[in-house]
Structures are given as structure tokens and as C-alpha cells.
Image (cartoon, rainbow, N blue to C red):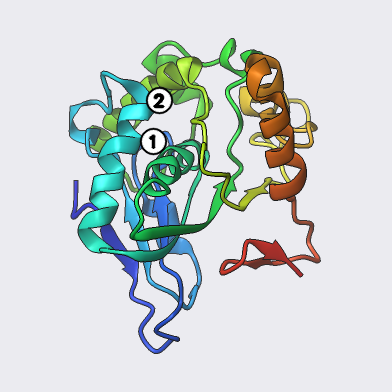
Amino acid sequence: MEENPCQIQSGLGTNDLSTPLILFHDAGGTVFPYFCLGDLHRPLYGISNSHFDHGGKWDHGIRQMGVVYAHFLRSVINSGDVILGGWSLGGCVALEVASRLMKLPQYTVQGVIMIDSVFPTSKVTDQYPRTIAEVAASFQLPARMSEARRVQAQQCILYAHEMQRDWRPPLFPLGLPPTVLIRAADPVHLDPDAKPHYLDLIRNWTYLGWEDVTKRRPRSEKLARYWLDRNSQIPNDRQYINLDTGSYR
């Protein structure tokens, strides 16, 4: 893989106080989608799956990703305010990294952005692909991707799903960061006659399955409900995100 973390946008010419945004890879292991973003007027970094060239497997799952990626972040940002986020799996990884940075006095996590990050509730995970062939049938990867990298990305997706089956969100003993959940407006398959993609099985759930946190972890029910009801908001086409505060206008 390329430099990791990689700087996607420098933020040059913007306010020096603009909070850096760090986005973590999706299940496919790359940060390519983040290069398609418009100018965010802030430093933007992407962290890709550092195990990509070896199939993307992590012996200790998403929790281990959080530990390693927190160190990656610290290698490019020594201290100060940060915003963390990611598409799909990347949103879950962002929570893991946030839980670690918030224990360090030199960092302030201003917010977490989960981009269409579906919580791994059993309604979804029971339908996860279990073979490379099933992954290939479920995901359309970029046409310009080489065959070798395509196979690696498919393997990453397969292992990512395995890790998500066992993953539970970290606890935040020092308090939760402001968290924004951005939902996709369209399903994965636009053909109305096609079988719904497993990620769309809870598309009509308000919080994409994060409601299920309260069922799986009864001891944290009060905390989880506070998180969802007070910190997580869903934008419509007339709202925009304030990345510095995590609020909407």
C-alpha cells in the first residue's frame, strides 16, 4: 500500500485553526473514495488497511485496528483537535480510535462522522458473504482496479465481515464525543426487482441498526440511548454538516 496515513487534502490557504479530519478505510481496505471529496477547507488524512497486502486479516479484529491506527494518527498529528470518521466499516474503526485518543490529554476528539455505517446486527451479519465468490457478487469494485488488487480488496471485505460479526462498540468512560450518522438515500441495488442487498435489510431503520446496541448491551442501555438520541443526527437534503462542531444547520 501507499504512504499510510496519506494526506488527501493539505488545507493550505484555510484557517490554521481548521480541525484536521482523519477518515478510515471501508471494508475493501482502501481510502480511494475520499480522494473524490470536494475541498473540505481543512487537512484531510486517509488511513488504509495496513494489512491489505496480506488479505486484510487482523488477529484481534477491529479492536486491534483501533490500537494500531491511533498510533498511525499520532505519527502525523502530535496533538490538538481532531475529527474522526469513515465510510461503512470506517465509521466503526473511527469509534475505536476515538475511544483511545480520548484517554490522551494532548488530544480532543471534536466529533465522529459515520458515513452509512451499518451496525452489525444479526439481521445483517447473518447474510454476510462467506466466500470470495459471494463477495464478488455483492460488491462492484472500480473497473480500473487491477485483478490482483481486486482479489486483495475482496479478501479484505471477507475478513472485515468476519471481524464485524464479533465486534461491539467500545465504551467511553470519559463521555461520548459528538457523533453524526450520515445515511445513504438510495439502496445498494437501484433495480427494484433485484434482491435487496444485505446492507439494505435495515435501510428503513432510523439509526441503521445502532438501536440494537441497547439490546445487545443492556448494562449500557442508558448510555447508548443518550448517544443515539442526543449525539447522532441524520441529515436530509436541506441540511449540512458543521464539521467543527458536529452540529447541523
Mark 1 Cα-neighbour bin, 10 Å: few <14, some 14–19, many ≥20:
many
Pick the quarter of the image with the N terminus.
top left
Identify the residue shown where x is 58% and y is 38%: 117
Marks 2/1 in contact by CB < 8 Å: the verdict is yes
x, y percent for residue 76: 24, 62
x, y percent for residue 239: 77, 65
Q: Nearer the viewer, residue 200 or 105?
A: 105
Q: Amino acid at mark 2?
A: Ala
Identify the residue shown where x is 32% and y is 34%: 65
Q: Nearer the viewer, mark 2 or mark 1?
A: 2
x, y percent for residue 149: 26, 37
Image check: 193 left or right of 55? Answer: right
Pick the quarter of the image with the C terminus.
bottom right
The local secondary structure at tag 2 comes to helix
Identify the residue shown where x is 27% and y is 24%: 58
Identify the residue shown where x is 37% and y is 52%: 32
Image check: 62 left or right of 188? Answer: left
Residue with the mark numbered 2: 160
Q: Which mark is residue 84?
A: none
- Name which quarter of the figure residue 5 lies in: bottom left
x, y percent for residue 174: 51, 43
Residue with the mark numbered 1: 28
Q: CA distance from mark 2 to mark 1?
A: 8 Å
Q: Amino acid at mark 1?
A: Gly
The local secondary structure at tag 1 comes to loop
Q: Report if residue 196 is visible in the image.
A: no
